[in-house]
Image (cartoon, rainbow, N blue to C red):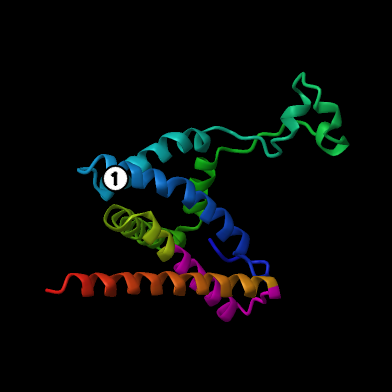
Amino acid sequence: LLTRNDGSAGGVQDIDSSLFIDGLTNSTQDQIFTTYRNFTGQQMMFVMAILTQILLFPFLLLPLPTHPLSILHHLPIPLAPHLGPRISGAPIIFSRPAFFESIQFLLTHPTAFKPLIAFACLGGLGQLFIFETIQHFGSLTLVMVTVTRKLFTMLLSVIVFEHVLNKGQWIGVAVVFLGIAVEAGIKRMDVMKRARRDPK
């Protein structure tokens, strides 16, 4: 998810958007775990998976337009004439539903089953650790863990696939490392202060 196949140093913008979404959702999950003490991480994971399936499954079964903006041209709205000739003159063409496309791909490429199942199992295992971390340690700890993981994933992508980061991107990497180091140092100082204050 954090690397691109075009040979560039992908992942920086993906990290930004992912962190923004994490900030919106993790605090809400924190509040749910604080309010409902008996609510577990596995239950949260199950509920979120069910809600995601309910929201996304209809889109898998419906034929979607290949060019969504072409629909605007056929609606009686003032924006339609200003969409440009390429968009406003385009007919509405619907593609096959994604569900049937996926089934056809798996039937024609049976070797994709094993890596797909492995990806699903490992992804589910990772989600279990994520929700357990939120439940027991809070969203701030999870953010530090996920930021560190994404940072090392990006650096691994740079090393393995020989991507090149510009100066601004290296500064961003250094800032993230510095932030992680400062946070770890502050936590260590807090632990040492508590140990001195409450000796056993």
The answer to whether any part of residue 151 appears in the image is: yes
* x, y percent for residue 185: 40, 75
Q: Which residue is mark 1?
A: 33
Count the marks: how many? 1
Look at the image and give the residue range highlighted in magenta.
Answer: 146-167
Where 25 sits versus 18, above or below?
A: above
> Does the segment drawn in magenta span residue 42?
no
* x, y percent for residue 167: 70, 75
Side of 33 where 173 appears, left or right? right
Q: Quadrant of the C terminus?
A: bottom left
Side of 163 where 160 appears, left or right? left
Q: How would you classify the magenta stretch by its main secondary structure?
A: helix
* x, y percent for residue 43: 26, 44
Residue drawn at point x = 53 percent, y = 61 percent:
1
Front residue of this view, candidates 153 and 102:
153
The amino acid beneath tag 1 is Phe
In the structure shown, which secondary structural element does the residue marked by tag 1 occupy? helix
